[in-house]
Image (tube, rainbow, N blue to C red):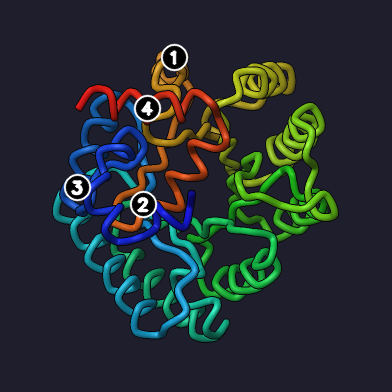
Amino acid sequence: MLDVIQTPGFQQRFFFLAKRFVAGETADEAMDAVAALNAAGMTATLDFLGEDVTQRDEAERTRDAYLALLSAIRRRGVETNVSVKLTAMGLLVDEDFAFANLRTILDDAARNADPFVRIDMEGSAVTGATLRVFERAFAHTRNVGPVLQAYLKRTPADVERMIALGARVRLCKGAYGESPDVAYKAMPTIRRECLRSAEALLERGVYPAIATHDERIIAAVERFARDRGIGRDRFEFQMLYGVRPDVQLRLVADGYRLRVYVPYGTHWAGYFYRRITERPENALFALRSIVAR
């Protein structure tokens, strides 16, 4: 299925399928979505969709799209930072090349009200390289932080490394298909690992982002923070655009900080595929989009 929906023709004709989860195909559309989130008391992180780039010129175009995005954020004055995937920056071409592109973005982001840049985590094949590039960038500026995926068996050690560095971590369950050699597969185990890492980050980390739509994990984080006297200004919840908006509004109403991950762009297929395969409800939303036309 993924091979089919990644074709340019499919993506041009069937964007309506992804509209619940992707804010638009242009930066202006994405900015409008962020403005609406801000009005509802939420902040955002914008992601220009694209990954697994294997050509230097394509990576440079993606870098330049981020520079244009950062400029647009300054003009609009919306409350958002940006997220980048290193394979879109050329990680599969050359690690030094990806780092140079990332550093250009970091330097430009420093001009924004929120200068932070999140480095998204991708499949386990590039986890090590992603964290190496992150550490190089972190030596340049503290306004950068990685995503760690709780289902990877290496993550507890990575959490401790990030705590020691003083890095801001976004913790999520993980959404890529991985082998049982490197990742836990059973959901009760993934929840356990996610909570274990969340507790370490909440107690000893620097402003962690707990990224989940799982209400059991959210409730457990709320209890842990309350029991340990961890203020709501010391962490934030993060959720995906279009996923569990009712829970997003509830968290804001309860006084928690909430940041919404807002993807946009024409290369939406891989992101959309992960959303509809990770939760049956998301596939149902896509089917409703077809019926409604």
Residue matched to label 1: 250
Which comes sooner in the sequence, label 1 or label 3? 3
User: Which quadrant: the C terminus?
Assistant: top left
Taking depth in this image into account, of 238 and 230 the one nearest to the observer is 238
Residue 39 percent location from the top left of the image: 23, 27
Task: Choose mark 3 or mark 2, whichever is in front.
Answer: 2
Task: Choose mark 1 or mark 3, whichever is in front.
Answer: 1
Taking depth in this image into account, of 133 and 49 the one nearest to the observer is 49
For the view shown, which residue lies furthest in the right direction? 181
Which comes sooner in the sequence, label 1 or label 2? 1
Where disc 2 sits, the SS reads: loop
Residue matched to label 2: 268
Instruction: Tell me which residue sits at (29%, 58%) in the image.
Output: 112
Residue 80 percent location from the top left of the image: 33, 46
Task: Choose mark 4 or mark 1, whichever is in front.
Answer: 4
Residue contact between numbered discs 3 and 2, judged by CB atoms under 8 Å = no
Which comes sooner in the sequence, label 2 or label 4? 2
Residue matched to label 3: 77
Residue matched to label 4: 287
| Three-letter code for the amino acid on which mark 1 is drawn | Arg
Give the alpha-carbon distance from disc 3 to disc 2, as whole Å: 26 Å
Residue 287 percent location from the top left of the image: 37, 27
Residue contact between numbered discs 4 and 3, judged by CB atoms under 8 Å = no
